[in-house]
Amino acid sequence: MPNGILLIDKDEGVTSRKVDNLVSHTLGERKCGHLGTLDPFASGLLVLALGKATKLLPYLDDAHKSYFAVLKLGTKTATGDLLGETLKAAEVPDLDPQKIADVLSSFLGKSFQVPPKYSALKINGVPSYKRAARGEEYELKKRKIEVSSINLISYDREEKTIAFTSTVSRGTYVRTLGEDIAEKLGTLGHLIKLRRLSVGPFLIAQAKKAEEATMEDLLDPTLFIRGLKHIEIRKEERKAVIDGRPFYLPDYGEKIFLCLEGEALAVYHRVEDRYEAERGLW
């Protein structure tokens, strides 16, 4: 059965879940999930996991993600992108590339961001976008984010659009970043294009279209998990791992893989003088 991760180049206009379903059907594996949802209007890199590899999604490196975005100045939408209803309009001041580049640079570093209400964040088990669509009144808490790079690609004076690239920390919403950039430029704005270029060590250049993916494209997820040592066990210890029994081992760090003949069986985490089971992978 399929077991591994796939790098998919998602098209605009489809949900991340629909990509999961397509790949699941094509490769014949019911279990399929992804690392970091892409909005329907966005395109680019979607990291999928199939079979047992879905259990390893939380351990993959997605601390930083890179994007190409196009920001349309002059209007604010309900969703922060071109799919939302227009809420407000504003004049766009006379701008030059240097002014825009300076404003972009001002977002470098750590700061706080309020996530958009039209997002998959759950509030008491209900996705925020569903509450927003029902017109419910609620507030989302600020989250710490980091912008490690942001660069101006071009500014179209006639179309009033700014194209830029950015590398941001996990949990950063580029739609909100675009709105904040527009505000700092003295106007309003929303994204009309968003393309994800990388997730941690994974690059869009390595990705395939969902309909082109094959079994040969599957990657071993354990090769991309940093900081977890692979500890080989004896064959007679396999049942102990499956039963989730603790192991008394030297301190190899906070978390480790317990493996048999190179196959990762479980993730264990350090508790005082031993390692206890966190997640089975069989």
Image: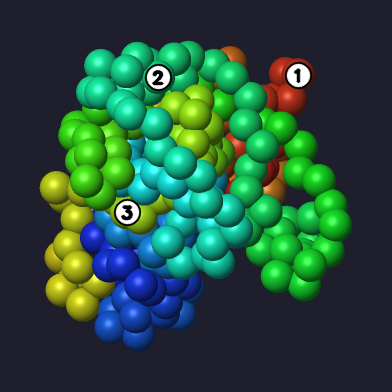
For marks 3 and 2, the one nearer the N-term is 2
Q: Position of residue 246 (x, y in %)?
A: 70, 37
Residue to which mark 2 is pinned? 103
Q: What residue is at 71 percent from the left and 32 percent from the top? A: 142
Would residue 156 be visible to someone looking at this image?
Answer: yes
Q: How is the image coloured?
A: rainbow
Q: Is residue 233 above or below residue 121?
A: above
Residue to which mark 3 is pinned? 193
Q: Is residue 167 above or below residue 115?
A: above
Which labelled disc corresponds to residue 272? 1
Give residue 199's quadrant in the image. top left
Q: What residue is at 52 percent from the left and 32 percent from the top? A: 183
Q: Nearer the viewer, mark 3 or mark 2?
A: 2
Three-letter amino acid code of the residue under disc 3: Lys
Total marks in image? 3
Which labelled disc corresponds to residue 172? none
- What is the C-alpha distance between the residues marked 3 and 2? 20 Å
Q: Nearer the viewer, mark 1 or mark 3?
A: 3
- Give the camera-side residue of 127 and 250: 127
Q: Circle 3 sits in a helix, a strand or a loop, which is it?
A: strand
Q: Position of residue 162 (x, y in %)?
A: 29, 38
Three-letter amino acid code of the residue under disc 1: Glu
For marks 1 and 2, the one nearer the N-term is 2
